[in-house]
Amino acid sequence: MAGLTALAAALRLLALADIPPGLYHDEAFNGLDALGILEGTHAIYFVANRGREPLFIYLIAATVGALGRTPGALRLAAALCGTLTVPATFLMVRAWFDERIALLSAAIVATTYWHVQLSRVGFRAIMLPLFIALTLWAAGRAIRNNRRRTWLLAGVLYGLTFYTYVAARFTPVVLLAFVLYLLMIRESRRLWPGAIYFAGGALTVLLPLGAYALTHWDVVMGRPGQVSVFNPLIHGGDLLGSLGRQAVRALGMFFVRGDTIPRHNLPGRPVFDPLTGGAMVFGTILAAIGARRRDTGSALALIWVGLMLVPTWLAEDAPHFLRAVGILPVLAVLPALGLARIGSWLRRRGHRRWSAVALGGILLIGLGTTSWDYFVRYPARPDTFYGFETAAATLAADINAFLGAGWDGAGMAAPSPGPDGDRRVYLDRRLWDEWASVPFLIAAPERVTVFSPDDLPLPSSPAMLVVWPHDGVDSLADALPRHSRIRAQAGPLAMGDLERTPYTAYVAYVLTDKARDPASYVARFADEFALADYAVEPSNEAWQVELEWLTWEPPGDDYTVSARLLDQGRLVSQADTVPGDGYYPTSLWRAGDLVVSTHTLELPADPLVDPTLVVGVYKWPTMEQLTGYDPDGQPLGPWISLPDSRTPSH
């Protein structure tokens, strides 16, 4: 069991700072409320983002308090809950079955892709399987020993379950069905009088949340009604057809097609690989036979899994792995029953070694497919990048790096020093309001001025101006301070769940003071601007080239800068770009601007022998190339060779 717990921890903590990328806004809302808790604001229910139960958010407050405003701080809380669910599953199953089935169930939970994925995202749903396991563990012990304190503990744990995730609200139906089963097999005496202590413990814990729900019914119950299949906006006038299609999809999640949302799953991946899925089918048959033979553990497993599928069956987008999370970890019992029976059949025939090989092989295949799918296939998918709003996390990391405080895009923890200097950030309100991860991740919000699009600020250097670029950038020219070094850089691409075409998420203008001697430059063009300086950072894969352009007179026209890498006179790489990634073109330049253009020159597979970097400027779209001149007025031709270009910088 210690080995399984260590394995579970490894799968949930390995590369947690990097996979998944970004930070989805549901996670960030949890983080924002955690910050409120750290500042002294306590709530029994958090109303933002369509309402959320509080227990996970209080846990996040501890991890954020320890690590700072980082995605890893939110996800560490989930990873801890996911890891603890494995030993809790062992305890739960052992209380209802035997130790062999308990070990197999814990191994399945530890290595199942669904639970690994859920354990690495800062969603509160990960707490529900943990508290289900703890509740059923205590309830199983209570039914066996009928001790009042054990019944009371089970009730307290069950009451806490309602503080985890919305799917817990359906569990009373499951418990009622199980009680009816006990009545049917004439075993209800095992519940008396312990059920009174169970109910007392549960109701006592539930009292604060229940009182809040009664006085804020629309807040607590609004979300389920919005996504219900009974909502005419969801079923579109075909309720019976929708119910049938939803049922097929929900049942198919185990073997055919799983959740397609990239935040919940490798899109479309079923819950189990074929071997474990086959064991689940076999185990389900065994559980049905056991339930007919008055085996309460088998009956509980069937009732629990069957009824806890209802929340995803009766809501849109079935199968939805968050709404179906209530079947975990009880679901693991079904394949464990099948595997245990296969193992015992082999042992009875004298094949103990083959029994171990068969069971171990099936579990190792599950571990291997989970590891490959999550750590190799999953992060390589573009929809993973977009689904977690990575562009928003990149923006926050860029702002923190500029201010010199907070999470810079790497690592689990944020550095503790505060911002240095007098730098400020001016941020378009649309970006602040649209992405909750931006206000959560920015470590020095007091240095950030949020502005409306119709009220552009007039920043002074040093500053960063971040805008939504899709309304045009021509009006920005007058807002940028003159005689500054201006680096305009487009952010990464973004794409919403319902969108089909990615778009540039934002554009950042980094403004710093840098006085220049107008007579000192590498080459001038058209008596309007000059290549003032440059830097080259070579690596094994590419050369990163940074060019600084000094403006004497506004060019008026749009020019494109071409950087080329030659080797023994032969062109091996080329990068043409409009300065500022196209968001501060030469037609907007003003006298005194020092504008940066950046170029990435990918290197060929063969080593370079005698590399030379050359730069040219041409007018778009006529392709008319400008001639460069040195400071003495001598023509240099259309291509300017940059000396010492093989050094890291110049």
Image (spheres, grey):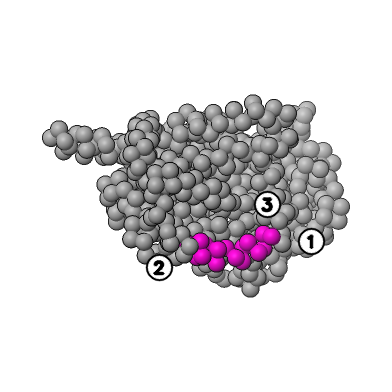
**Residue occupying the point 37% across, 39% down:** 291
Residue 624 in the image, given as x and y percentages of width and height: 76, 30
Whether residue 307 is visible to the viewer of this picture, yes or no, is yes
Q: Which secondary structure dominates the residues rendered in magenta?
A: helix
**Magenta-span inclusion, residue 472:** no
Nearer-the-camera pick, 276 or 123: 276
Q: Is residue 285 left or right of residue 117?
A: left
- Which region shows up in magenta? 198-214
For the residue pair 47 and 15, the one nearer the viewer reads as: 47
Where does the image place residue 173, in percent across and percent down from the top left? Answer: 54, 47
Looking at the image, residue 12 lies above or below residue 262: below
- Location of mark 2 (residue): 149
Residue 204 lies in the magenta-colored region: yes
Q: Pick whichever of labels 1 and 3 is earlier in the sequence.
A: 3
Can you say whether 64 is above or below 637 in the image?
A: below
Marks 3 and 2, the one that precedes in the sequence: 2
Mark 3, secondary structure of its residue: helix
